Image (cartoon, helix red, strand yellow):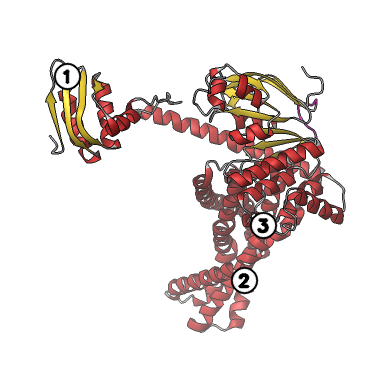
Amino acid sequence: MAKDSIIRARDLAIGYGDHVLMERMDFDVAPGDVFLILGGSGTGKSTLLRTLIGLQASLGGRFEIEGREAPDGPPPYGVLFQSGALFGSMTLGQNVALPLETWTDLDARTIQELVCAKLRIVGLDGYENHMPAELSGGMKKRAGIARAMALEPRLLFLDEPSAGLDPISMAELDDLILTLSASLGVTFVVVTHELASIEKIGSTCVLLDRDARTIVARGDPRELKETSDDPRVRSYFHRGAEAPAR
Amino acid sequence: MGAGYKIGAGGEGAVTLAGSLSLADAGHLRRDLVPALEGARTLDVAGVTALDGGAAAVLAAVAAQRGAELVGADGDVARVLALYTERTSRAPLRAPAGHRGLLSHIGDATLELWAAAKDHLAFAGELASSTFGAFRRPGDVRWRDVGHLLERHGADGVPITIVIGFLIGVITAFQSALQLGKFGADSLVADLVSLSMTRELAPLMTAIVVAGRSGAAIAAEIGTMKVSEEVDALRTLGLDPYRFLVLPRILAVLIAAPLLTLLADVVSIAGGLFVAMSSLDVSWQGYVLSVREALGVADVFGGLFKAAVFGGMIALIACERGLGARGGAEGVGRATTSAVVTMLFALVAVDALFSVLFNLWGI
């Protein structure tokens, strides 16, 4: 077990009610990693993410985030949901300001400056007074990241950030993730399907398999793609086709 | 047999199929092939000149059912057939539901009721816990939203309340004047209008307007937030959706409903005055004097108390249904409909209960 893991899960089981989707999951996420949760549709990737962020109870085992099983006070992480989940009745500025107003004693002017700064680093400078409905899908995702980063968490969870985006927006979002990871040392836990993103941003990954009901591979996604002999891994990374001979 | 194809015997255990096949032939083809393939080992399709996806699907399915191998396909026909014969299908996660009996439906309904009861209890528990927490840490509640919500659910409802209140007053005055006139008791119209309005009709009609306007809006708004993951986002920001969304709305509607009811009391009595002056030859001074003599403080405040209870109930039901919304736009629609129906039923039921209680208490 890595001593400095930001997330550690042991014998974790997830699912709904009595229906176990995944079990016997052990993994560690090291600080600064871009950790990918991979697997086919319906394997439980998003359920695993929802379990880790406390929106769903685990069905067994345990996990810790920054050494604590349940956070007290503001969560030590930020979350970007698949849809962005910006509050539709608030401007972008108010969305980003909300966690700052709730959890800090900062004055309004400082909060305003922080909001502008957060929006600037995600490429939304000047959009403080726009409503979420006025933004494109990619902009909503970037605004969601700005809100998730408001309290300077060391850990960000992203649920299918590329979903519904065009290739250019997708690439921009990948670049943003890499920039934040490199500049701020933020650890990312990302659920994704996009092979291009997987190869570009992932430093380590776990592959969930529906039939095995557990993690069937882990490691650097590029290495797994090139070297794994496991047919499930080869099928996943080569879009269901047999991989070319190595 | 269909006109576009021909089925024949091709030797030992073989059946031949020839011609041009399309979706339009699929029904005939199935009917003709099922008996023709009885005991056959192969179905030779070498004579098929054209085949679309619909016909290929039927061909592949019937051949598989009869255990006959499809042979002789070539070119485009082979490619279309391959699509329907070579693709392996994954086993469905859940077996398709067959015919289900009455007991099964009763069982499902019972389980749904049990799940709904658990949801109601969970909502009540979370709300109680949040309310208690709000007393301990009032700063956690979004008080600043209450003013804005009061405007939306109170002030914005003033015009419709005035129109409906006035018209109800007019209708009640007309109807009572017709009946009372038979006994020469026209002068009691003011008494009847003022008492029936303040005690019963104004609180109930206003509550129905609030349920239709505000209750439906709250259920739809929170339901949309739920299905678009905004409620989850609140939780991950460390914010309690009950303190952030539910308590301000309950407070706003709890305050707005009695205020709108008071307005409805005044305009409905004014509606009665309009009828009395225009049709009954009653002076406004006489009408006002009758109202003052007929109405007691308990009548007005009893009605306002009822209105506050109705308002709280409407907001509670709307928030509960909104937070229970699942499954996208359809789920929001279902939650909103369910909220409005439940509110209307609850309003009438609680109003009946109030009638009994007020009678017992001598109000």
Q: Crowding near pointer 3: few (<14 within 10 Å), some, many (20+)?
A: some
**Whole-percent x and y of residue B110?**
47, 31
- What amino acid type is highlighted by mark number 1? Ala
- What amino acid type is highlighted by mark number 2? Val
- Whether labels 3 and 2 belong to a single chain: the reply is no
Tell me if residue A69 is in the magenta stretch: yes
Residue stretch in magenta: A67-72
What residue is shown with label 3? A131
Residue B320: image quadrant is top right
Q: Crowding near pointer 2: few (<14 within 10 Å), some, many (20+)?
A: some
Tell me if residue B57 is in the magenta stretch: no
**Whole-percent x and y of residue A216?**
60, 19
- Whether labels 1 and 3 belong to a single chain: the reply is no
Chain letter of the residue beneath label 1 in the structure image = B
On residue B14, the disc is: 1
The quadrant the C terminus of chain A occupies is top right
